[in-house]
Image (cartoon, rainbow, N blue to C red):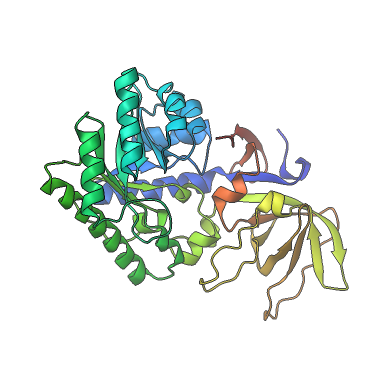
Amino acid sequence: MKNLNELFTPCLILDENKFSKNIERLKSIVDQKNINFRPHLKTAKCIEITKRFSETFGKRAMVSTIEEIEKLKICGINDFLYSVAIVPNKFDRIARCLSEDCKISVLVDDISIARELVDFYKQTGLKITALIELDLDGHRSGVKSNSSEQLYQIGKCLDNEGLFRGVMSHAGESYNLSNSKDLRECARNEAEQTLLAVSILKEFSIECELVTIGSTPTTFSDYHNDKINELRAGVFVFFDLVQSGVGICRTEDIAISVLTSVISINKDIDAIIIDAGWMALSRDIGNPCHKVDYGYGQVCDINGKIIEDLIVVNVQQEHGIIKIRKGSKAILPQIKQGDMLRILPNHACATASAYNRYHVINEENKNYEIWDRFNDW
């Protein structure tokens, strides 16, 4: 066992105590709302964390890549929902993951794809079920929740062959919010628009077994509608600076960070140079509409204690530039070359994708173990 000072940088640190508390907090919320919960595995992409999910929330999960299904079937999950609108060239690989104890549902937003999925089932006998993806805010794929003709055509096509399962929506606009009132309204809109689609389908005698909505912010809102039977979230397991900007966590709750070495001190520009650039941190600058600008990440000392107003202001491929936040009266701390710092990420999913392992630290922040993660599609 090594301590943090002996690790090669940059590397990804996971605070097990914090991520366990984040899971416990989410569990208490869904228990209070008395609703099924489907964790999104795209953030963690890790066997150990997925096992924790299945022990805590049950056997359902959402994924954004087929590799997540292939690698994480062994973790007790038997009900996967693939979160990217499906296309026919993925049918065969998804079907190879099917078994008596593993069902997989996909998302459809066009009648032509629904017909292709039905044809695949008729030709192979392999049953990939589907949900209609709803677009609530015009920001990516999906059917408008009031589009009766599209809902009918897709739903009827799938339902005739026993492939239709329900509807799914995602409140992507929730990440732009920063107060509880707006968040509650967003969650209400998410539920009501989704239920509008459910009611339209019901008029055509098409029943929705699964009515699933979710984003980490709306899941943590105080809104609840008992006609929704499933919530989803993913980044809650780690949280990040965007979620703290939304207001659903504190920066102290963020469970992952990038351990980095100070490689230079530039006194001419009052900057600390680190070996974590955009390859290690990502280029995600968070959300400009939030109250606090963290640049490319909040700087902490090696033990994870936040150094106020010290942020990564710029990134190059392998270099990060740390300065005092503009307008602050703070001064650059006494840090020398070879010292180690930790950077809290703006977007946990994007930052974690740069790494193939977590260095999992205990409460003393000294010893660690390795949990592998994966990044392919």
Image-based side of 372 in relation to 194, left or right: right
Say if residue 100 shows up in the picture: no
| Residue 312 drawn at (x, y percent) | 70, 63
Depth check, front residue: 271 or 114: 114
Image-based side of 5 in relation to 124, left or right: right
| Residue drawn at point x = 45 percent, y = 62 percent | 175
| Residue drawn at point x = 42 percent, y = 32 percent | 88
Depth check, front residue: 205 or 181: 205
When asked about the image quadrant of residue 304, the answer is bottom right
| Residue 50 drawn at (x, y percent) | 46, 34
Depth check, front residue: 150 or 72: 150
| Residue drawn at point x = 65 percent, y = 53 percent | 282
| Residue 140 drawn at (x, y percent) | 43, 55
Q: Quadrant of the C terminus?
A: top right
- Check the image and report above or below for 29 versus 265: above
| Residue 345 drawn at (x, y percent) | 60, 56
Image-based side of 206 in relation to 123, left or right: left
